[in-house]
Image: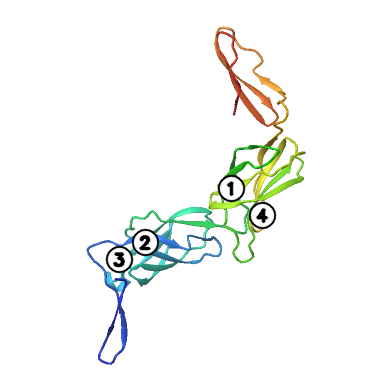
Amino acid sequence: PAGASVFDAEDESFFVTFFDPTRPPTVASATPSFGDSQRPPLVAVGGDNFAPASAYPPGLGLLCAFGDVSVKAIFVHSRQLLCRAPITETVGSVNLSVSVNDGNSWLPSVTRFFFVDSAEPPTTEAVHPRNAAREGGTMLTVRGINFVPPNKTDGSQSMCAFYSTGGVLLAQSPATFVDFETMRCESPGLPDAPADATFKLISAAGLHSNGLAFTFEDLSSAPTVSAFVPQGVPVEFGSTCEARRRAQTFGGFFGQSGAAAEPVLD
């Protein structure tokens, strides 16, 4: 059990923890599982078989490690410790572990803690797919770092934003938080949108990410080829070519027979 109340002759209560000294503690969870890197929270570390520092040899304290940074841990009961996450320049996921011998060794742990920096914009690394029909409705998956959940206080959330190459905002759509490195949103309907556009993620605090090339397609008309690379190939060998239409690339293969394969979207 996590603890038990016992009573002395004067009916004063004490909290007693039962633990198994032959079995190492385990680390199972962190609540909350994320925090601001410049305003770190107090984290409840869940697990099993924790014991107060007094149960271990003198001078060997309880520690939590957030990645490479260790901090003091406070014993609560056999299934919980409290640790203040450190101030750090790290943004992203780190391993969270516990030491019961002042850092001489660390308990095995797969628990992760995510540091975000709400004062900095998110970084987008990829959006998939990177093209959508002008009619809208394509589900987009955005990958990157420093993604934050919606603000529970005022309800603000991240947005997917689409700009012209000249920087004019075309449309926005709400972004659904999946995890600290993944967002999802639906492409907007933009019948008159230019083919070439720029995708950005706007955080709940209104900070804009870096831009990624994005293409809106008009499915009602045939594509127009603006370049073909290479323009000549040896007749005795099969060669791969690229046909470019603005921001998109199509691949094809010409075999020794001279027959052309169907182009495939890259």
**The N terminus, quarter of image:** bottom left
Q: Of the two numbered discs 2 and 4 on the same chain, state the one appearing first in sequence.
A: 2
Q: Which one is in front in this view, the residue at disc 3 or the one at disc 2?
A: 3
Question: Which label sits on residue 49?
Answer: 3
Amino acid marked by disc 2:
Val
Left or right of 79, for residue 90: right
For the residues marked 1 and 2, what is the alpha-carbon distance in whole angstroms? 34 Å
Residue 86 at x, y percent in the picture: 48, 63
- Residue labelled with disc 1: 184
Q: CA distance from mark 2 to mark 4?
A: 35 Å
Mark 3 Cα-neighbour bin, 10 Å: few <14, some 14–19, many ≥20: many
Q: Earlier in the sequence, mark 3 or mark 4?
A: 3
Which amino acid type is shown beneath numbered disc 1? Arg
Q: Which residue is mark 4?
A: 207
Q: Secondary structure at mark 2?
A: strand
Q: Secondary structure at mark 3?
A: loop
How far apart marks 3 and 2 lie (CA) works out to 12 Å
Tell me where residue 17 appears, x and y as whole percent.
Answer: 29, 74
Disc number at residue 98?
2
Q: Which mark is residue 149?
A: none
Q: Amino acid at mark 3?
A: Asn
What's the distance in space between the residues labelled 4 and 1, CA to CA?
A: 17 Å
Q: Quadrant of the C terminus?
A: top right
Q: Nearer the viewer, residue 90 or 186?
A: 186
